[in-house]
Amino acid sequence: MSGDRGTGEIEATLIAGDGIGPEIMAATVDILAALGAPFRWDHQQGGMAGVAAGGDPLPQATLDSIKRTGLALKGPLTTPVGGGFRSVNVRLREAFSLYANVRPVRTMVEGRYRDIDIVLIRENIEGLYVAFEHYIPIDDDPHAVALSTGVNTKAGSRRIIRFAFDYALRNGRKKVTVVHKANVLKALTGIFLETAREVAEQYAGRVAMDDRIVDACAMQLVMNPHQFDVIVTTNLFGDILSDEMAGLVGGLGMAPGANIGEHAAIFEAVHGSAPDIAGKGLANPLAILLASALMLEHVGRGELAERLRAAMQGVLHADKIRTADLGGTASTQDFARAMIARVSAGASNAGA
Ligand code: NAI
Ligand code: MG
C-alpha cells in the first residue's frame, strides 16, 4: 500500500477512546513497542474522554494532529443514542474524506465455520449516514413524524467501487459482490448498482462481479459464507453486514477496520466501547491488534504485520491464552503479556 517503506519512525495519532478503549489501547501500544513497530504516538482525545477533558467530543487538537500525521489508531468512541452529540466516528470520516472502510474477516479460532476469508468494503461518507434528519410535530407531539434523507452520488459510488476492484486486483482476489436494495430504494441504491455495472466492465476478465439484494445477502452469509470474496456496499448496509461477518469468525473481538482517504487513514476495531465489560479487564484486544496489522501494511511494513499475526496465532493456539469472548479465562493483560513474549522472541530471532 502507500506510505513509508523504510525503517524510520512514523508519527501517528493515538486516540485511546471510551469504555474498553483505554484497556485495549494500552495493551496494543505495549505489544507494538515490543514488536519494534515504527510508530511514535501523538496522544489525543476524543469521545466522552474529550468531553470530560475539555467539553468537546472531537477537540481541534485531535483534528490538527490527524491532519499533520495523516495516520491514526483509534479506540472505540461512545456515541449517545437518540439525542446528544453526533457520532465522532462519522465526523472523523467526513472531516478527512475517509471514503473507504475496509473490514476483513478471517477465521483465527475454530467456530461454526472454517476458513472464512471475506473482505467487506463499505462506502463510508454517503448514504443514510449523512443523517439529514428531522421531526415533524403534529398537535402536541414534537416527534410525531421522523424523516431522513439518504444521499448517494455517482462520483462517490464510482470511487468506492473502483477502490473495491483495485483492492481485489492488488490482493489476488477473484470476485466483487455488489450489495444493494435497488428493488425498493431504486434511486438511492439503484445508482450504486448502476455505477458498479459500468465500473466492472473496466475490470472484465480480471475481477468478476455479481450482485445481491442486502436481505438475501444477510441470509447467504450465514448459509454459505464461502461464496463471498470481496463485498462492496453502501454505508448503512456495510455497517450492519460487517458486524454479521464478525459473527462468522468469533465475534466483534476479531474484526478490524481501516478508514482510508486520499490524505489520511484511521485504523480501528469494528466493535464499539463495550460499556458492559469496560474496566473489568475482560476485553479482547485482538480486533484492535488486527487493525494495527492493517496499519503496518498501510505504511509499507508488511513483514511486521505478518509477525504480529503469527504471534496472535501462537498465543491463541499454542499458548491457548484466550479472553472470555473466545471461551477462555485470560484477561486483557494476560493476553497482552503472552503477545509481548512472542513478539519479543520473534524480534530477537528475526533473520536467524
Ligand atoms: P459494542 O461493539 O461496543 O458491543 C457489542 C457487544 O460485543 C457487547 O456485548 C460487548 O461486550 C462485546 N464486545 C465488543 N468488543 C469486544 C471486545 N473487544 N472483546 C470482548 N467483547 C467485545 O456495541 P454497542 O454496545 O452497541 O455500542 C457501545 C458504544 O460504542 C455505543 O456508544 C456506540 O455508538 C459505540 N460504537 C463505536 C464504534 C467506534 O468507535 N468505531 C463502533 C460501534 C459502536
Ligand atoms: Mg458498526
Image (spheres, rainbow, N blue to C red):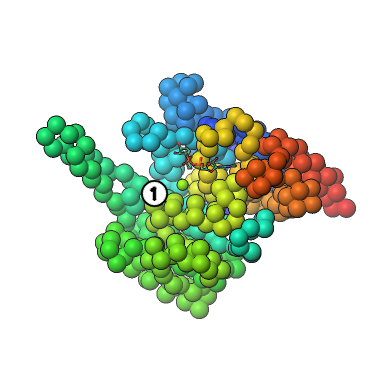
* In this rendering, position of residue 61 left or right of residue 305: left
Residue 98 visible in the displayed image: yes
Q: Residue at x 55, y 45 (%)?
A: 269
Q: Quick check: 219 above or below 133?
A: below
Residue 210, by quadrant, is bottom left
Query: Of residues 231 and 247, which is closer to you in this image?
Result: 247
Q: Which of 74 and 70 lies nearest the eye of the viewer?
A: 74
Which residue in the rendered view is the most extreme toward the left? 139
* Residue 323 placement (x, y as % from top left): 67, 42
> Please, what is the three-letter code of the amino acid marked with disc 1?
Ile
In the displayed image of the protein, which residue is found farthest to the right? 352
Residue in the picture at 45% in, 72% down:
209
Q: Residues within 10 Å of mark 1 (few under 14, many from 20)?
A: many
- Image quadrant for the N terminus? bottom right
Residue assigned mark 1:
125
What residue is shown at x 32% (from left), y 61% (from top)?
189
Q: Secondary structure at mark 1?
A: loop
When the figure is inspected, residue 89 is found, relative to residue 5, above or below; the finding is above
User: How many numbered dots are placed on residues in this image?
Assistant: 1
| Residue displayed at 23% across by 45% down | 147
Q: Position of residue 350 (x, y in %)?
A: 83, 50
Report whether residue 102 is seen.
Answer: no
Q: Is residue 27 left or right of residue 21?
A: right
* 63 lies left or right of 324: left
Residue 191 lies, in percent from the top left, at 31, 63
- In the image, 59 versus 256, the foreground residue is 256
Question: What is the x, y in percent for residue 105?
Answer: 58, 57
Q: Is mark 1 within 8 Å of ligand 1?
A: no
